[in-house]
Image (spheres, rainbow, N blue to C red):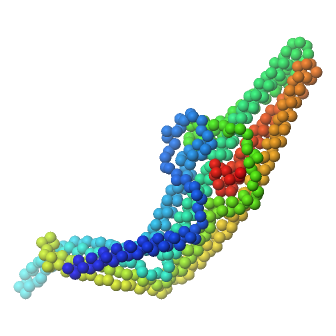
Amino acid sequence: MKSRSITFSLCRFLAAITCGYASFSSHAELLLDAHLTAQPDKTWQAKTGTASGVTGMTAPLTLAELTELALHNNPATREIWAAARAQAAAADVAGSAYWPTLDANVSLSRGISSINTSSGVVSGNTQTRLSPSISLSYLLFDFGARAATEQSARYGSLAANLNKDRVLQDVVLKVEQAYYQLLAARQTVVAAEETLKTVQMSLTLANSRRQAGLATIGDVYQAETMLAQGHLQLRKAQGEAGKLKGVLCNSVGLPVTAKLEFAALAGRPPVREIRRSIDAYLEQARSARPDLAAAEAQARAAYADIDAAAAQGRPALTLVANAANTYNNFPDYRFDNASNSGSIGINLSVPLFDGFRTRDNVRQTRARAEQLDAARDRIASQIELDVWQAYFDLDTAEAAIDSADALLRSAVRSRQVAESRYQSGVGNLPDLLSVQASEASARMEVISAEMAWYANLSRLNNAIGIFSSETGTK
């Protein structure tokens, strides 16, 4: 009966501890949330699927659909998501220090005892013993060591989630950059084909004029040279498009051999939508960049580690309790032949000397905290530079689009005039071939300027810390 009473008391105590910890945990979580930097509203929960089943897709995908596919399939997203889950589990492990530990132990032994009598006869007694026991240990007070350890782990979990968001943004940027590069390459192929048709017409016209005695064989050779150059440029453009298609597949997380088709952009770049000032972008980046918030969380975790390290050299107060029964002559035991024991008490542990380990740990963690402070400031400075450069690159790209459009309009008119002059017998073939080359170059400039604008817009959004689909640059 004594054993049952002790066991029942331990169960009641364990239930009380559990309820008390639940209340404390809720309060601690509220306090922690009050100090944590707000996380972005939209987070992506990556799925651990593979690219199987999508490698044979043929339907054209929009940029948004390509991005969605990348967030599912890109190995970087799965890697960082697993790291975030691991850090969250580490935070739960740190929180387990607030719970008591309860251990059960059962031992079964068999022994033989012998007695030497005066007549020299040895008599033996065989005994089997069963000893079940239960013990409880609960840390009552440790000068804040476990609280600091849990706080550090919670900040670490927050930093892992924020870094996850930044990796997702980088994946989006990688997909967008690959998409715009491939789109530009394919438009270059189309432009090269158009140029080839124009040069072919010039060669046909030169042959006709030569047969009529109005042109020399040199004009034909010049046209043939331009045609050969046109074929070479087309082949280079096709090769570049093929290479960049593999880059896009890789950024999405698919094999480079995947039959991936994508939809082209509709319309011209909306350059007039970019209206905000550089100061507004810088301010937005300070609050939106998850890696900056992650660096701040890591610094706070390091300062919590200082408190945890300092508390290791302080006393600790622990509640201990145990209950045990011992049954003799098992399995033919009788309950009235059992012995019961139990105890409950408090242990005070006072570190006296640890070879200066606590002092050195505090020095190490303080230096680590100072290092992370500097890393946070470095990241903040780099963010400002990234936003600054992306902003002016985008501004330059906008101006380049206007200039490229004007250049193309002028080149088209020049080519039209040169063709009319040559057909009427007034102009010469070198002049016609020259303006045709100028028109081809102008078309390439337009393609380059437009794709550069989109690429710089995605860089600016990435530098600010938002997804391009949330375009905050309007």
The extreme right residue here reads 426
Q: Nearer the viewer, residue 98 or 353?
A: 98
Q: Residue at x 22, y 71 (%)?
A: 108
450 left or right, relative to 44: right
353 left or right, relative to 263: left
Q: Residue 436: x, y in percent?
A: 84, 29
Q: Quadrant of residue 422?
A: top right
Q: Residue at x 74, y 50 (%)?
A: 274
302 left or right, relative to 471: left
**Residue 79 in sight:** no
Classify 347 as above or below 417: below
Q: Residue 317: x, y in percent?
A: 42, 83
Q: Quadrant of residue 270?
A: top right
Classify 76 as above or below 180: below
Q: Residue at x 38, y 76 (%)?
A: 17
Q: Quadrant of residue 93?
A: bottom left
Q: Residue at x 27, y 81 (%)?
A: 342
The extreme top residue here reads 212
Q: Residue 89: x, y in percent?
A: 47, 63
219 left or right, relative to 391: right
**Residue 337 in sight:** yes
Q: Residue 129: x, y in percent?
A: 19, 74
Of the 4 image quadrants, the one containing the N terminus is bottom left
